[in-house]
């Protein structure tokens, strides 16, 4: 420890200039915003908005607290800024390791974290009891508390407690608090941005209500509403930079000559003090779904707060049902992308598959063949589309042309099939050929056998998946106390979320399967030996009733495809994580040379992944055709880019070797939530693509950041 | 190579006889004899372009020789692919190609021969078993790892080499080929890799250590084979030569007068 700190003593000299200057500027901004805010509430001279009270004698407790608090905070920020400007070499490291007095900058950070903790606890108390005069209580009766309010209370208490504990850690010179504090502030900045943005979303309703004017007429009122959020973000940013700047100091140079254990220890020490970014990066390298989880939770929370309609079953069900196609194709694309390739031709494959299926059922395509039973049509469609997938992979492997070019040309070539056979913008509709859907009588005994086989098979698969997830979670939990990683808490939360998502999907499927098993047995007992159902409905019909839940209301559009989609997620997660084939897939994309050196047939793995993707596209095309009971020549156009977008958002690397099924699922969820949510909060639907583009960019930036670990 | 000498020493593990390789009109190897004894560390030295990589690629099945014969454990073998080489127990650790950076240590260790257990009709990777056996196997040759689930990308270059060596030892390979293993490593890490190389030898493996820098291999090698312009300059036991002499031979491709007189039999290409 002593050699460690002596080696870094020289560091401050190299670390003045820009980072500190920028921190000082932020501190000044904090001071400015707080003082303006206080002035606005107290005097109202600066026209930031309508003054809350006209008469100065009317100040209520909240306003008095706000005025005094913001004035003090502003002065404190100013003091810190001046202190930083005068003594740029204040060392936080010395405070922790050499018992020097606490530097003012660290005081600012400590108080920030402590205040954030206190505010969180106060908010929780306010929502729960309404006693603290922070504002009007949302609900009067405690029994009325809704999901968001409960979440606020629980998170407020946990988060507030953690923040206060961190502040206490600072005062006690507990060095882990140093990295803890960074995490707390980092998350506060993100949370602050979310609150800020949700304020922006609420503006159309809030701002005019107060003054009877439109937003543009009342820009100052808008500012007043957003100022607390701004203040929070700026303060957290300043405190974060103070803590992080010290981390950014040159790492101690220590001659490492010992064995790997010593090296590992040295790295442990370095890891404990590494900048937050390194810790996130290490974490992301371990769990490819992490970025998608953060994105999913953030966007889900954002929409839940921004609009009441979002958490309605109607919205969620349609967000799921509308994305069955993308969801299935994203699974295959993720597999393929992990093995280092991608496929632009999926949209055309979907078109070919739909034409094949609908054409066979109606007897239109291939020409001269009479209508066949939908089950045969489905089998032939799957076989044919898989063959086209094989052609993709074969061309890639044999010609060694990059997959972009190969599948770009097959994208164009395959599209030719539906364009030729469905002439002139026509739509091939089932109802033009038959009066009623293709009803089939299915023996209930057969259904029971199939369901039972599915149940046993999925039971075995999900058992190993769940055991694996539980193992991961328990490992994180048991090593928690000894783990010095900055990111251990977040790691624990990630592992828990991954476990929870898996458990949710497994439970959903098991309940559905057991429910339908019981239902069929019941019907059989009542003497009904056959189920009459249209093949289309079996594939992707609306689910009319669910076991346990009962009848699904008419306005909720939950489709059978969602159920099949979830089953596919489980199966492919198993393939990817629990089988030798999955290991080979990772290796082929991660380092083809190493895979080959270990005896893995790289070409075969790639071709197989192309076929698996084509298989999923074929299934998706049957679902798609079943849902609309029609097909047109351009069906699936643009799908390739949407799916690659969802996959990339889900954390897979275009360069291969990295990705997860949870990521593929959440990537599509994020896509679907954006589609539904943006409409619900009233944002122009034409902005959808632009926003998705922005999300992709952010996702890829995060991915690249984590990928640097590769070199 | 005299017949008398063959009886003096144990049968070599690998013997490559009169290997010729031409690419079009270019003669890369012009009849090279090369051998590696049981439990022997051979430093294969040569300047860039001397032909040492080509020779090794023939041994590992990447190239097939234009003419010449390879004997493994005394039996003539044809090695047509890296899989063939692997099959008979030759493991190559390439500097960049050994491991997959984004996969965990344990997954890398077992890549291609994962431990599985049956769950009903399914074959499932036994990750616990893989992790614990990885840890133990590496510990056996003195490599301590903290967490087998850590991605290889977070390890240093030397640690990666060590893990690749540990893997070859564990899977009972007979011949380990290290291709320029230390060229990108620090002094301390090089020392560690050399130590594990020796540990591999102690466990019964033979090692070919390819390098153009004598300093990296002098400590561990039992013998040096020096190649220049597709021909063998000489074969020397470590006791017979100084580091400087070897370095000069690598540079000039000529055997100094003093060494020509030593009747080792293993030396010279006469």
Image (cartoon, rainbow, N blue to C red):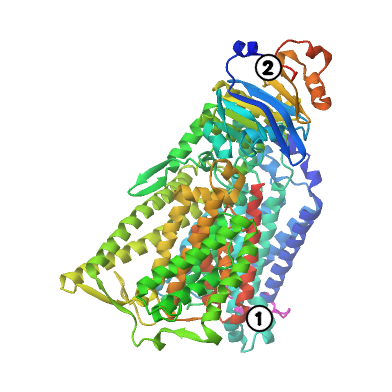
Compared with A616, A317 (above or below) is: below
**Is residue A56 in the magenta section?**
yes
Q: Say what secondary structure mark 2 lies in.
A: loop
Point 46% across, 64% down: residue: A615
Q: Are marks 2 and 1 on the same chain?
A: no
**Magenta residue span:** A42-65
Which quadrant: the N terminus of chain A? Answer: top right
Q: Is residue A643 visible?
A: yes
Using residue A668 as the reference point, say whether residue A208 is left or right of it: right
Q: Nearer the viewer, residue B42 or B74?
A: B74
Compared with A432, B194 (above or below) is: above
Circle 2 crowding by C-alpha within 10 Å: few under 14, some 14–19, many from 20? few
Q: Nearer the viewer, residue A523 or B26?
A: B26
Mark 2 chain: B
- The answer to which quarter of the image holds residue B234 is top right
Question: Foreground mark, 2 or 1?
Answer: 2
Instruction: Residue A221: give its label.
Output: 1
Q: How many marks?
A: 2
Compared with A554, A590 (above or below) is: above
Point 37% across, 49% down: residue: B122
Q: Which residue corresponds to mark 2?
A: B1
On the image, the x and y values in percent for residue B220 come to 67, 21
- The answer to which quarter of the image holds residue B178 is top right
Q: Nearer the viewer, residue A151 or A406?
A: A406
Tell me how far mark 2 sits from mark 1, CA to CA: 96 Å
- The answer to which quarter of the image holds residue A94 is top right
Mark 1 chain: A
């Amino acid at each position: 420890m002593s050699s460690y700190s002596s080696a870094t003593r020289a560091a401050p000299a190299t670390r003045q200039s820009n980072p500190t200057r920028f921190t000082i500027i932020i501190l000044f901004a904090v001071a400015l915003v707080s003082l303006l805010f206080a002035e606005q509430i107290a005097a109202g001279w600066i026209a930031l908005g309508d003054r809350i009270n006209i008469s100065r004698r009317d100040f209520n407790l909240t306003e008095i607290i706000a005025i005094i608090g913001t004035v003090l905070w502003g002065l404190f920020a100013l003091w810190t800024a001046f202190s930083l400007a005068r003594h740029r070499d204040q060392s936080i490291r010395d405070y922790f390791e050499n018992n020097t007095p606490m530097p003012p900058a660290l005081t600012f950070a400590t108080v920030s974290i402590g205040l954030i903790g206190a505010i969180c606890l106060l908010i929780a108390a306010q929502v729960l009891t309404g006693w603290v005069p922070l504002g009007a209580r949302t609900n009067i009766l405690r029994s009325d508390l809704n999901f968001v309010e409960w979440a606020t209370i629980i998170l407020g208490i946990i988060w507030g407690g953690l923040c206060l504990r961190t502040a206490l850690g600072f005062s006690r010179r507990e060095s882990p608090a140093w990295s803890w504090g960074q995490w707390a502030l980092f998350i506060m900045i993100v949370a602050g941005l979310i609150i800020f943005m949700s304020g922006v979303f609420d503006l159309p309703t809030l701002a005019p209500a107060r003054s009877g004017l439109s937003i543009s007429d009342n820009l100052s009122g808008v500012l007043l509403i957003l100022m607390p959020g701004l203040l929070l973000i700026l303060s957290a940013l300043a405190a974060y930079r103070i803590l992080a700047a010290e981390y950014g100091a040159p790492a101690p140079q220590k001659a490492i000559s010992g064995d790997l254990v010593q090296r590992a220890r040295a790295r442990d020490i370095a890891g404990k003090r590494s900048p937050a970014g390194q810790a996130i990066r290490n974490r992301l390298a371990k769990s490819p779904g992490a970025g998608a989880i953060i994105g999913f939770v953030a966007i889900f929370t954002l929409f839940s707060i921004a609009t009441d309609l979002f958490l309605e079953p109607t919205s969620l069900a349609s967000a799921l049902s509308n994305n069955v196609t993308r969801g299935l194709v994203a699974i295959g694309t993720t597999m393929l992308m992990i093995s280092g390739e991608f496929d632009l031709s999926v949209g055309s494959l979907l078109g070919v598959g739909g034409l094949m299926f609908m054409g066979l059922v109606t007897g239109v395509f291939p020409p001269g063949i009479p209508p066949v039973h939908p089950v045969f049509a489905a089998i032939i469609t799957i076989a044919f589309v898989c063959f086209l997938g094989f052609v993709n992979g074969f061309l890639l492997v044999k010609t060694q042309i990059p997959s972009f070019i190969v599948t770009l040309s097959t994208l164009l070539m395959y599209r030719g099939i539906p364009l030729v056979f469905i002439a002139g913008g026509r739509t091939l509709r089932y109802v033009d050929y038959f009066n009623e859907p293709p009803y089939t009588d299915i023996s209930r005994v057969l259904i029971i056998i199939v369901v039972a086989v599915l149940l046993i098979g999925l039971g075995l698969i999900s058992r190993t998946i769940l055991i694996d997830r539980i193992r991961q979670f328990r490992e994180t939990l048991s090593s928690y106390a000894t783990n010095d990683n900055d990111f251990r808490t977040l790691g624990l939360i990630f592992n828990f979320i991954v476990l929870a998502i898996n458990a949710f999907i497994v439970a959903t499927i098991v309940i559905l399967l057991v429910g339908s098993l019981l239902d069929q047995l019941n019907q059989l007992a009542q003497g009904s030996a056959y189920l009459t159902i249209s093949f289309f409905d079996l594939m992707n019909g609306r689910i009319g009733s669910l076991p346990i839940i009962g009848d699904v209301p008419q306005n909720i559009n939950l489709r059978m495809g969602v159920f099949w989609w979830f089953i596919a997620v489980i199966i492919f997660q198993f393939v990817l994580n629990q089988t030798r084939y999955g290991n080979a897939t990772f290796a082929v994309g991660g380092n083809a040379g190493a895979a080959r050196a270990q005896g893995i047939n790289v070409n075969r793995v790639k071709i197989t992944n192309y076929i698996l993707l084509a298989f999923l596209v074929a299934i998706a095309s049957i679902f798609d055709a079943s849902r609309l009971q029609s097909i047109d020549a351009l069906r699936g156009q643009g799908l390739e880019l949407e799916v690659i977008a969802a996959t990339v958002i889900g954390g897979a690397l275009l360069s291969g070797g990295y990705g997860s099924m949870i990521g593929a699922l959440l990537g599509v969820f994020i896509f679907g939530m954006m589609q539904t949510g943006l409409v619900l909060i009233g944002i122009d639907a034409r902005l959808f693509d632009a926003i998705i583009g922005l999300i992709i960019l952010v996702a890829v930036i995060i991915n690249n950041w984590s990928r640097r670990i590769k070199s | 190579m005299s017949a008398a000498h063959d009886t003096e020493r144990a049968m070599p593990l690998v013997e490559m006889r009169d290997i010729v390789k031409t690419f079009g009109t270019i003669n890369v190897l012009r009849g090279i004899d090369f051998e590696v004894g049981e439990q022997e560390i051979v430093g294969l030295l040569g300047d860039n372009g001397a032909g040492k990589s080509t020779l090794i690629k023939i041994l590992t099945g990447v190239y097939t020789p234009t003419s010449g014969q390879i004997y493994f454990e005394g039996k003539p073998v044809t090695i047509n692919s890296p899989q063939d080489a692997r099959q008979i127990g030759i493991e190559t650790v390439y500097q960049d190609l050994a491991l997959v950076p984004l996969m965990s240590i344990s997954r890398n260790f077992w890549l291609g021969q994962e431990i599985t257990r049956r769950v009903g009709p399914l074959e499932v990777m036994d990750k616990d078993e893989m992790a614990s056996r990885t840890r133990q196997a590496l510990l056996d040759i003195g490599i301590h790892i903290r967490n087998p689930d850590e991605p290889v990308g977070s390890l240093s270059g030397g640690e990666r080499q060590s893990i690749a060596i540990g893997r070859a030892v564990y899977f009972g390979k007979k011949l380990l080929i290290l291709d320029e293993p230390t060229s990108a490593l620090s002094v301390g890490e090089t020392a560690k890799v050399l130590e594990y190389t020796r540990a591999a030898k102690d466990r019964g493996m033979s090692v070919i250590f390819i390098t153009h820098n004598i300093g990296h291999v002098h400590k561990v090698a039992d013998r040096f084979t020096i190649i220049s312009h597709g021909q063998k300059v000489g074969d020397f036991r470590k006791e017979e030569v100084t580091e400087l002499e070897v370095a000069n031979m690598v540079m000039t491709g000529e055997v100094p007068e003093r060494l020509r007189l030593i009747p080792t039999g293993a030396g010279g290409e006469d």
